[in-house]
Image: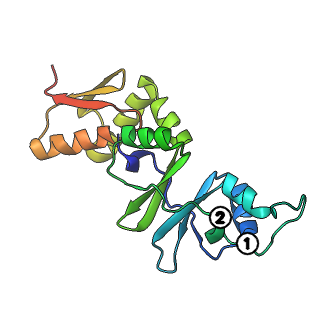
Amino acid sequence: MRARHVMSSPVTTVSTGTTVEQGIRLLSRHGYTALPVVDHEDALVGIVSESDLLQGEFVPGAPGARNPERTVGEVMTSPVVAMSQDVDISALASAMLKSRLHSIPIVDGVAVIGIVTRRDLVEALAQDDHNIDREVRHRLEVYGGTHRWTVAVEDGVVSLGGDFLDDSERRIAEALAGSVPGVIAVRSGPSP
C-alpha cells in the first residue's frame, strides 16, 4: 500500500507569515495535529505542530503573556521530512517512529499534495478482510461490471480470479485491488 492510498488530500497548508494564533484556530477548527508550511511559491518549507504552536503562543518567561504577532515561520520545524505519494506505508511508519513524527507531508516535487498522519496508518492497517473484500468488489464492479471476477481476501492478501481480456486488464484489476487500504498483496489468475 502506498502513501497515495492513505493520505488526506487536498491538504490545508499555512504560509510562513501566518500568525501562530491563526494556526491554532485552523488546528482547532479542523481537528488537525500539524500543518505543512509553504512559501510564497507554494513550496514546502516546514511543518508546524500543535506543540510548536502552543509554545509559540506564549511569551517565554512571562506566565500568561501571549504573543499575537508571532508567526508560523518563527516556530515551525524545518527542514521537514516529506515523502512522495508512491512511497510504501512501511517507509512512512518507519520514518514516523524513528523521528517521533506524528505526520508527514506528501509531495510532488516541492508541492504539497497530501499528508499522512499516524492515525491514517493505524486506520489503514486496521482494515479487516470483510471490508477489504467489499471495497475491492466495489472498485472492480465500477470498472468492469458485476460478477466478472471472483474475489477472496485472507489476511489482507487479495486473490482475483476471472477471465481477463488481456494482460492490460489484469494489471488494471490488480492495481484497483491494490489501491484499497489494508491490502498487503494481490494475486490473480483464471477462475477455477
Distance, label 2 to label 1, CA atoms, is: 8 Å
Where does residue 19 sit, x and y in percent of width and height?
A: 71, 72
Say which element carries label 2.
Answer: helix
Where does residue 130 sit, x and y in percent of width and height?
A: 43, 24
The quadrant of the picture occupied by the C terminus is top left
User: Is residue 187 left or right of 58 when viewed as pictured?
Assistant: left
Coloration of the structure image? rainbow
Q: Which residue is mark 1?
A: 70
User: Is residue 47 left or right of 158 when viewed as pictured?
Assistant: right
Mark 1 neighbour density, 10 Å: few (under 14) some (14–19) many (20 or more): some
Identity, as a three-letter code, of the amino acid under mark 2: Val
Q: Earlier in the sequence, mark 2 or mark 1?
A: 1
The residue nearer to you, when weighing 118 against 59, is 59
Q: Quadrant of residue 112?
A: bottom left
Q: Which residue is mark 2?
A: 75
Hey, which residue is sitting farthest left in the picture? 166
The residue nearer to you, when weighing 62 against 78, is 62
